[in-house]
Amino acid sequence: MLHFMYKVDSSDSIFQNDTRTKISNRFKYFRKNQATEQLKAESMWKCLPGVLPGLVPVIGMVPDVDVFISNYTIVDPQVYQLWVDGCTSQDAVDTVHKQVPKHGDNTLELVKSDVSDHYRTYNLLEKLLHNPPKLAEQLHFQIEPLTRQLLIEKYYEFDDPVIRELLGKKLSSRYRKDLDEVSDKTNISVKSCRRQFDNVKRIYKTVEDMQGSLIKNIRHLFLLPEELAKRYGAVVFMANMKVETGKRKLQYLTFNDFYECALAIMHSWTCPAGTSEHEECDLDREFFLDLREIRTLLDKEKELKHLVCSKIKPQLLEKAYQELENNFRTYSRSLITLGCNLHRQRDLKFLFIELVEKCIEPWRQVSWTSNDLTAFLSAFKTCALQLDCLREQDTRAAWERYMSVLACCLLKMYHS
């Protein structure tokens, strides 16, 4: 009979109360003869987590396995990631088995047992992960703080292509059933797509009516790191805006493109801190009303063209400059008219498609580079402020807020 004297340091290893049974099962196949058991036991001993240096299994004619255990939960980052990614238990076994050293014919059985234990644990933890603060409060699983943070962050991480497909969609149960198409398009498992869908919907439903900072609320309620909370905040914000992202002409845009645009809008077009119950979420209607006054720039087109062309000429190649001179009226009117109409909900909803059709496509046709566009937008913004028609402080401030976001969005969306 095999007798293991196995001591576990709680700071190094994490075990449940069934450890005695697990270890006994893992090594029952050694009970053949004492002459070979010691060698096999020593080789397998190195595979166990948490074994203190210098300890070896002792073979003796005793009827049981003696184990000293701690009460912490095992979390294997690799297996957990496979579980989060929606891999089946068998797929996870195949992946892990390819990477572990081979110790006899029973290594596969050990891996199967270990992965199955992990999957059972993670399935039990999943309900708690839906409400991360409860993970720290519950008493069924003892989890170290760093391990707990790993569980939460990995569970709430998302794949940009999946969330790109969800943008602009109604987060309904009916759509959840049709995520097979998203899975096929993104090459990400349906189970993972559903996890990400559920996480977005859960966070959206939790914070949509809450007062205060959107991003801070997400961080506090779901214990997410700053960057991940900002990414979810952008998704929630765009869902609140009901902005159109699914049109064919927008399909080339990535999640990161929309993310950067959403952050810019949240920073500059929403109500200032302290003036709204829903910070970073409520659009500043006063700003959009003030923005209507930039219509006066349409009457100063010649003056504006002269200022912009004079400023930008040294920065452009001759061909690009000629295109600007010939088409300035079109470019100028598109930018100004778009801003004048943003107070209407419909124009705000179709902001991105308007930017593509009225600005980006014409610039592509004349083969402008990103540097050309950067120079033009900078000159257009600053030169307009030199005109008398923008003397009013509120109008000047509205113009600067408008153009700062527009420049950010156009440069991000302009894939030359």
Image (cartoon, rainbow, N blue to C red):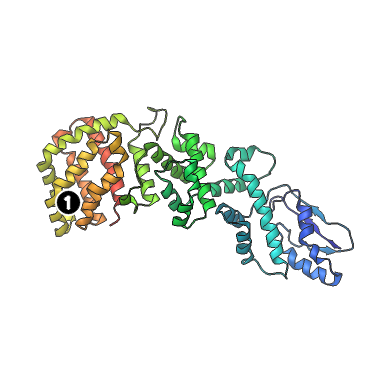
Q: Which image quarter: residue 169?
A: top left
Residue type of the residue flagged with mark 1: Ile
Percent coordinates x, y for residue 41 in the rendering: 78, 66
Residue 403 locus on image (x, y percent): 26, 41
> Can you give x and y, in whole percent of width and height, for residue 224 in the image?
52, 43
Residue found 22% across the figure and 35% down from its top: 340
Q: Residue furthest bottom?
A: 35
Residue at screen point 73% across, 61% down:
53
| Residue 60 higher or lower than 377, as above or below | below
Q: Tag 1: Cα neighbours inside 10 Å, few (<14), some, or many (≥20)?
A: some
From the viewer's perspective, is 237 left or right of 303?
A: right
Image side of residue 163 versus residue 192, left or right: left
Residue at the right extreme of this rendering: 61
Image quarter hosting the N terminus = bottom right
Which is nearer the eye, 122 or 284? 122
- Name the side, left or right, on which 140 lies relative to 275: right
Instruction: Name the residue at 39% across, 46% down.
Output: 259
Residue 369 visible to an observer of this rendering? yes
Mark 1 = which residue?
312
Label 1: which secondary element: helix
